[in-house]
Each structure stands twice: as C-alpha cells, then as structure tokens.
Amino acid sequence: MINENFLKLSGAYLFSEIAQKVKAYKAEAPRADIISLGIGDVTQPLCPAVIEALHKATDEMAVAASFRGYGPERGYDFLREAIVEHDFRARGIDIDADEVFVSDGAKSDTGNFQELLSKDVRIAVTDPVYPVYVDSNMMAGREIVYLPCTAENGFVPQAPLLSPQGGKNTSPLGENGKGLVIYLCYPNNPTGTTLTREQLKVWVDYALNNNALIFYDAAYEAYIQSEDVPHSIYEIPGAKECAVEFHSYSKTAGFTGIRCGYTVVPKGVKSERVKSEKSGLLETISLNSLWNRRQSTKFNGTSYLSQRAAEAIYTPEGKTQVKATIAYYMENARLMREVLTDMGFTVYGGVDAPYLWVRTPNGMKSWEFFDWMLRSAHVVCTPGVGFGSAGEGYVRLTAFGTHENTKEALRRVNDKL
Ligand code: PLP
C-alpha cells in the first residue's frame, strides 16, 4: 500500500507545471524566443575563486595521497569553521562548529528536517509560501495552518493572530499539546519582502512563550542591502533556544548545480517526548543530536569538491566576486522595480531580495496573466497562486536573468500592454 498522503499533494510541483505549459507553447510557436523570469535559477557563472578551488580539489582527487572518500558526517571542518567565522562570529553571533551541518542544499534540509518531529505537531506556514515546507509536511500527514501575507499586512505574518493576548498560546494551534512549528523565510520567496529585527523578535518571543519551534530559511540572506534587516535569526536574543536555520549557497554564489548549503541546529533547541505514559513525565531531547543521527543514517555527505568550492566563497577574493554577482542581479531587480512601476504595476520586493511580487493588472488571475505574458510577450513568470491562495492576483518575477534578457523582457511587456 502506498503512502496516501502523496495523493493529497497538488497535481505537480509548481515549476514542473510551468515547464509543461512553456513546452506546450513552444510546440505551438516554435519560433518564439522565450525569456524566463520564472524559476529562480541563476544565470551567471561561478566566480573565479570557486573555479580555482574546484580545479585544485579535482587535482587532489587524482592523487592517492590527497584523494578523499566519504567525508565527516557534519561536513569538513575547514568549511564549518569558515561558516562559523564569516557568517556568524563576524556578526557577533556565537555558533559552535558542532551546531553546523553541511548539506547538499536547503531544499533537502527544509524538506527533511520535519522527520524529527511527531506527526501530530502542527505546522504554520505563510501564505504564499515556498512549496517545499507544505509538501514535505503533507507527505508526513501533518496538519498545516496558513498565515496570510497580503498587501494589507505588508506581507508580514501576524504572530498576535495566533495568540491575541500574548503569553501562553490560546489559539487552536497550540491546543493539542503536541507542539507547533512555524516556517519563516526571509528575505521571502516569493514576495521578496523582509522582516526588520523588531518584526522578527515578535516571532522569536512568540516561539519562546508558546513552546514553539521556528524553522528559519535564510536562503536569500546574501541579498539583504538594508541595515535593519537581520541576516540570521540568531541576531535575535533567545533564538538559539527555539530556531533552526537553513542556508544555501545556490543563490549566494550560483551553486544551484554544484549543490551545497548548511543547517544550523543550536544545542539549545530542544523537543520533548513523554518519558512515562503513566505519570506523563516529559523528557527533553536535543534536536542537534537527533539531526546528527538522522543525517548519519540517511545522508552520506556533500562532495569534497562542493565543500572546497563553498570554502572559497569566504576568501577575500571570493567575497568580493560573490558580492559583484549579487550586485549584478540586484541591478536587474532595481531596473524591474523602476520600469514596472512606471508602467503602472504595483510592485513589492526586489529591494533586499532577488524576487519581485507584482500585482496583476485589471484584477486578472495569476494564471491568466501568466498566459498573457507567455503568449504576448514571450516572457515566463511564476503565477503567485502557485505559492498559495493568498498569492492569487500576483506573479513572481526573478532578478536572476542576464541584464540583456531582463531589459528585453521589460521592453516586450511594455510594448504589449
Ligand atoms: N529555500 C528557498 C526559500 C528557496 O527559494 C530555495 C530555492 O529556490 C531553496 C530553499 C533551495 O535551495 P537549494 O538550491 O540550496 O536546495
């Protein structure tokens, strides 16, 4: 018998559905020159520091004395030390290298981490949301609660909605006593919005007061430009007791094909189990040791080459080169915001994130506007409704195109409007 939960998932993964539609249109109009501002894949090559590290690591693999086989289960020390130093200590955050788990990217980890928790734990996600959080929890048969993020609330999920009086959770979310996990992703995919330190503190305090966990996806952290936007949830006091944080080099340094990321599981983040059914006595368990157990059973590490490549991002040359590529994409974001706003569109995001969240014109539905963009302008966007019902009436555009394609896409939309 199959896991019936898979049948409850929506028909296809959003980007597969888009790819099918584009393919069908290409069959209809083979000469159409289609520009994709849809799926969030990058277009710029790896930076020279990364390429050099990859060549060097490859040469090491060719010699018995420096050949590497299976690596340490949490990742090589050289990379975990670099992460701790540059991503955390440099920001005044004290994270131990043993709290860092190198992975093959944030999709696997954000999808897999829920395995550590009981099926009865409730899951809160923003709507719209990166679909992986929803689908992975649905596969496990969990109940999901949606926190609407709309123009009215500035695309910021409202913690007080869960617990109007503050303090202990009185909402249906906490009532079954089995716990609550809140997934937050900032800078946000898909809306491109961010939380200030004050806004994120509301959630950390909420989690601490309500015995909830936060799974914080920082995949787009490198795109933050504004001073008051935190790069890590651990900038907020108390977060090391309630939050797990996911990082990815995919968008930071063009690693979508190389594959590398990491997850921080502070030793202070604990979950509970009933130790004695009779007395109801609870025992706390460290998620750090559980995740280590899980990874050492089911994951055999990120390749040595990928980890050496990731290490190179933290060298002075690597940092400068990666920053230049991010600036390249953020120039696209700036231009798209400016030109689309001039055309009369209402545009959110694109300031501290490589995504723009664009209101469709004349009340068009997301998929209707997607079709119009594809057929009239030969530009692919992502329908907002694919990220959740609150995304209806929006599309997401990415800044990951080349300058030339981005300008051309804007020109075509303007011409066809
Ligand atoms: N998290 C978010 C919010 C994303 O948008 C993405 C990729 O688009 C990922 C995680 C996946 O990143 P990775 O390539 O590291 O698996």
Image (spheres, rainbow, N blue to C red):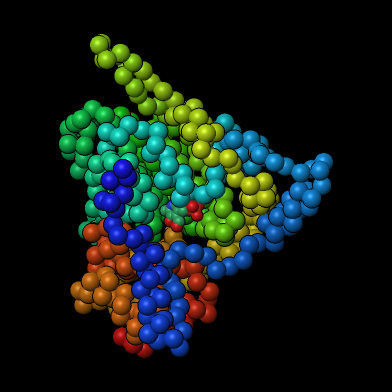
Q: Is residue 111 above or below residue 333?
A: above
Q: How many marks?
A: 0
Pick the residue in front: 336 or 40: 40
Q: Is residue 97 left or right of residue 121?
A: right
Pick the residue in front: 376 or 410: 376
Pick the residue in front: 16 or 349: 16
- Whether residue 274 is visible to the viewer of this picture, yes or no, is yes
Q: Is residue 253 above or below residue 21?
A: above
- Quadrant in which the N terminus appears: top left
Q: Quadrant of residue 274?
A: top left
- Quadrant in which the C terminus appears: bottom left
Q: Which residue lies at the image location 46% right of the left edge and 84% below the top edge?
A: 33
Q: Which residue lies at the image location 54% right of the left edge and 58% below the top edge?
A: 256
Instruction: Check the image and name the residue furthest to the front.
Output: 1
Q: Position of residue 51 (x, y in %)?
A: 70, 59
Q: Quadrant of residue 252?
A: bottom right
Q: Is residue 382 left or right of residue 8?
A: right
Q: Is residue 260 above or below residue 40?
A: above
- Whether residue 198 is visible to the viewer of this picture, yes or no, is no
Q: Quadrant of residue 377?
A: bottom left
Instruction: Check the image and name the residue furthest to the top.
Output: 279
Q: Which residue lies at the image location 46% right of the left edge and 44% below the top edge?
A: 109
Q: Position of residue 247 (x, y in %)?
A: 50, 47
Q: Position of residue 286 (x, y in %)?
A: 44, 25
Q: Which residue lies at the image location 30% right of the left edge and 13% below the top edge?
A: 276
Q: Position of residue 249 (x, y in %)?
A: 55, 53
